[in-house]
Amino acid sequence: MNSYPTSDPVRSITESEIDSFVSDGVVHLPGILNIDWIDFLGAALEEILNDSTALADLTSLGKNLSENEGFEVLSDEDVSGGRFLSGVDHWKEDEAFAAFAKFSPLPFIASKLMNSENVFLYEDSILVKEPGTSERTAFHQDLGYFHLEGENICTVWAPLDDVDSETGAVVYLRSSHQEKKVFKPNWFVTNESLPGTQGNEVPEINIEDKDLIRFDTKPGDLIVHHAATIHGAGANHSISRRRRAVSVRYCGDGVVYKIRSGAPLKSHHKNVHTGDPVIDHPDCPLVF
Ligand SMILES: O=C(O)CCC(=O)C(=O)O
């Protein structure tokens, strides 16, 4: 017997929340996750944060890209001192991250919103903005990073702290998933696309634009966005509040592999071809 928190959500998902996900390409689900999951995941996240080698420092990456490539880093000059830390695929090594991605309510929630009988785990990501992190998250679309094609692909963003526009809330371009376009992935802290990538450039978006969808969130809330929805995030202007979040990315029925040049490859991608259906695999397991 394991001792994970419950895999049941605190409440059901409403029809209007499903409609928002379908029409806007994003939905905020307040108070849907038992807070025990946040404590459970938070303990594992602290261990990772205490290991100086475990995460990529995107603040340093931005400095390197600026000095060596001349790229413009998207940063707010009135803040400094914090780091934007990021990592992927912690579920492969860390039992708590694996439990969160596989046995928490997240797979069920992804299934409901995507209206997909099956749900496969593609990846998880840690996204931490320490107090005083000046870097914004560049506007991007997840799909361009994924070697996948299909309608049923989503990201579940789980905050581990109260998050608002002061600390770097994520903002979403309403209904951008309906454009049916794939945009080039970028370096996350600049608008420059990753080398060797193909496709459309992400349109220029002003993060202050009032028409962007933005949510204040608390631990226990989730935001779920469609993989084709364009989104970005602000700097962390707070001097004391961290913005810790974990994203888990899922795909479902009808999704096939699509190898996209220049996008980050995982080990099993060398054994799949464009057009192969996603099926249960140790590196992309069926979780619902
Ligand atoms: O947390 C952030 O700053 C960005 C999150 C994001 O882009 C994602 O999880 O897809």
Image: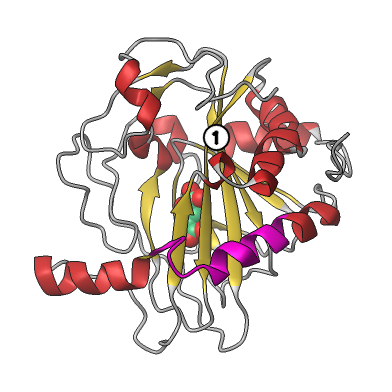
Q: Would you say residue 90 is visible in this rendering?
A: yes
What percent of the width, then of the height, locates residue 90? 54, 47
What percent of the width, then of the height, locates residue 23? 58, 34
Residue at x-position 35% and y-position 24%: 269
| Mark 1 CB near ligand 1 (8 Å cut) | no
Decide: is 12 above or below 131: above
What percent of the width, then of the height, locates residue 60? 30, 72
Q: Nearer the viewer, residue 25 or 222?
A: 222
Q: Quadrant for residue 250, please give it.
A: top right
Which element type, helix, strand or loop, lies under badge 1? strand
Task: Examine the structure image and report whether residue 68 is included in the region drawn in magenta.
Answer: no
Q: Nearer the viewer, residue 270 or 222?
A: 270
Residue at x-position 77% and y-position 37%: 105
Q: Would you say residue 211 is visible in this rendering?
A: no
Quarter of the figure with the C terminus = top right
Residue for badge 1? 154
- The amino acid on which the numbered mark 1 sits, given as a three-letter code, is Cys
Residue at x-position 45% and y-position 20%: 150
Q: What span is colored magenta in the figure?
A: 41-56
Query: How many marks can you see?
Result: 1
Q: Nearer the viewer, residue 218 or 47?
A: 47
Decide: is 155 above or below 52: above
Label 1: how many Cα within 10 Å (few below 14, some 14–19, many 20+): many
Image side of residue 16 versus residue 140, left or right: right
Decide: is 27 above or below 258: below
Residue at x-position 62% and y-position 21%: 286
Q: Give the dominant element type of the magenta stretch: helix, strand or loop.
A: helix
